[in-house]
Image (spheres, rainbow, N blue to C red):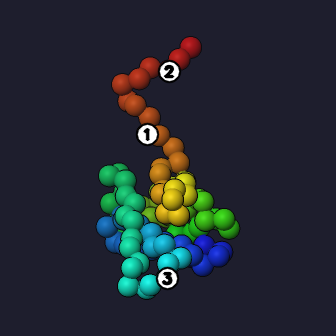
């Protein structure tokens, strides 16, 4: 949960992380956003949000650490991977 207690992040055993925006008027209207990466298929054991709720860190059983950066868009949190996957076909620039 973030510092302001408005965003909750929970991981599951299949490598997915669910984000809940708790800053709503009606509890029945809580909806989740699912974050996942195809390379992550082990349990998400811990999640941590930065103080301002803009960075999410997820730690998995296989030793990987995933960082997701958020953007606040129309009062909705949208998380995106912090780093682009390297393209194996690209050649390093000189």
Residue indicated by mark 2: 92
**Residue 30, x across and y down, in percent:** 41, 78
- Decide: is 59 above or below 73: below
Local SS, label 1? loop
Quadrant position of residue 36: bottom left
**Residue 76, x across and y down, in percent:** 49, 63
Answer with mark 1 or mark 3, whichever residue precedes in sequence.
3
Looking at the image, can residue 29 be seen?
yes
- Decide: is 45 above or below 41: below
Local SS, label 3? loop
Q: Are marks 1 and 3 in contact (CB under 8 Å)?
A: no
Q: CA distance from mark 1 to mark 3?
A: 38 Å
Which class describes the residues within 10 Å of circle 1: few (<14), some (14-19), or many (20+)?
Answer: few
Quadrant position of residue 88: top left
In this view of the protein, which residue sits in the foreground, 34 or 77?
77
Identify the residue at image location x=41%, y=23%.
90
- The furthest residue to the bottom: 27
In this view of the protein, which residue sits in the foreground, 8 or 21?
21
Quarter of the image that includes the N terminus: bottom right
Compared across the picture, whether 73 is left or right of 15 comes to: right
Quarter of the image that includes the C terminus: top right
In this view of the protein, which residue sits in the foreground, 48 or 44?
48
Which class describes the residues within 10 Å of circle 3: few (<14), some (14-19), or many (20+)?
Answer: few
In this view of the protein, which residue sits in the foreground, 6 or 37?
6
Residue indicated by mark 1: 85
Residue indicated by mark 3: 25
Compared across the picture, whether 93 is left or right of 18 comes to: right
**Residue 39, x across and y down, in percent:** 35, 51
């Amino acid at each position: 949960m973030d510092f302001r207690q408005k965003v909750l992040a929970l991981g599951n055993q299949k490598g997915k992380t669910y984000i809940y925006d708790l800053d709503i008027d009606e509890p029945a209207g809580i909806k989740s956003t699912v974050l996942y990466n195809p390379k992550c298929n082990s349990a998400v054991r811990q999640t941590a949000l930065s103080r301002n709720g803009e960075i999410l860190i997820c730690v998995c059983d296989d030793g990987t650490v995933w960082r997701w950066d958020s953007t606040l868009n129309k009062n909705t949190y949208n998380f995106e991977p912090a780093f682009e996957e390297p393209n194996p076909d690209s050649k390093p620039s000189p």
